[in-house]
Image (spheres, helix red, strand yellow):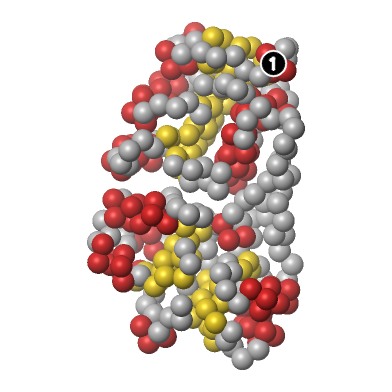
Amino acid sequence: MIFPLDQFPEKARGFLSFPNQIHMLEDELRGRFNISDENIAKAFRHGELLVMDEALFPEIVCNRELLDKKELPFWSKVTWLDPKIITFDSIGQGANKLKEMQRSWASYSINCFRRSALIQEKLPYVNLKKRVFPVAIHRSPMGIFSLLDNNSMIASEKTSSLFPCGSLEFVEDHENPPSRAYLKFQEALVNFDILYGCIPESGNKCLDAGACPGGWTWVLRQLGCDVVAIDRTELANFLMKDSFVKFIKHDAFTIPPEELGHFHWVCSDVICYPERLLKWVWRWIESGLCDNMVCTIKMQGKTDWSLIGEFENIPNSRILHLNYNKHELTWLYHRERI
């Protein structure tokens, strides 16, 4: 699709959805930001990218600071904070126009694939490969561009993500983890490190609620942590035999924090209604017995945005939708030290 240059908003926002989840992004724009169906229908569309007039959104959504993204759509894997149309006559000129704006760029390609790749090759090197966890992410601005045709592109030098095209992907271990749930936990921890400057480390005491079959416990053990794993069903055999894993057969949400004691990390991937999770995390926060929390909020049926807002309003916390999440969100909490 070629955007009519005379109709492109002077100040715009671009929202690139997670793969095959553009319907979730549109539902969020309606339900969380009160964007009408009419205005969503008017958006410029390029693959899974929606570009909309900035004037439709609250002022906080229009903040162009790199990491100030608390009020941006969760189902936008990368928000284009200042999208512009750029025209060029050659591959070299296209690359030079991007380099004049900033150093690091990644391509969102849905057409003109060869030409897009050639432009990417002429730009400064950016690691576009899958990563091996744990990984440190450079805190440098990451731009994004996408060719509309051979001589025009849409590009934003400022985005909401430090990852190329908003995606962090890992080299998968197909042999050792007991489930693929470990991937979203690894991704959550990388984001936790970006936001709060820490991840679980050797000797930390960690609670894994709803641990079966043990994907999150496995990650914590790889980091050298001591784990208390709670579930009604046992973990994978090798984790049950691990002397640094204490398994408790129980409903994790019915054990008072005071009975379990202090933990550096409290984690939950429990399948439950968000209301129940919210009560549980408040019990831990109010107990003062946890330093950090990572929980998945399982979305069931129509999203209750007022309830999600209650999670958002918890001090020192953030909500994210991750590359390895599906119909769920991830909530992070870091207790500030006085």
Which residue sits at x=40%, y=26%?
272
Q: Is residue 282 left or right of residue 123?
A: left
Vertical comparison of 229 with 136: above or below: above
Where does the image place residue 193, in percent across and percent down from the top left?
A: 61, 42
Where does the image place residue 257, in percent across and percent down from the top left?
A: 47, 14
Frontmost residue, 211 versus 144: 211
Q: Quadrant of residue 53?
A: bottom left
Where does the image place residue 217, in percent across and percent down from the top left?
A: 63, 24
Labels in figure, total? 1
- Residue designated by label 1: 237
Q: How would you rate the neighbour count of disc 1 (Cα within 10 Å): few for under 14, some for 14-19, many for 20 or more?
A: few
Frontmost residue, 331 versus 18: 18
* Residue 282 visible in image: no
* Residue 242 visible in image: yes
Vertical comparison of 266 with 129: above or below: above
Which residue sits at x=69%, y=85%?
92
Q: Residue furthest bottom?
A: 89
Which residue sits at x=35%, y=52%?
28
Which residue sits at x=63%, y=73%?
113
Q: Is residue 210 left or right of residue 173?
A: left
Asked which secondary structure carries label 1, the reply is helix
Which amino acid lies under the numbered mark 1 shown in the image of this protein? Asn
Q: Is residue 72 left or right of residue 214?
A: left
Where does the image place residue 128, in percent across and percent down from the top left?
A: 69, 59
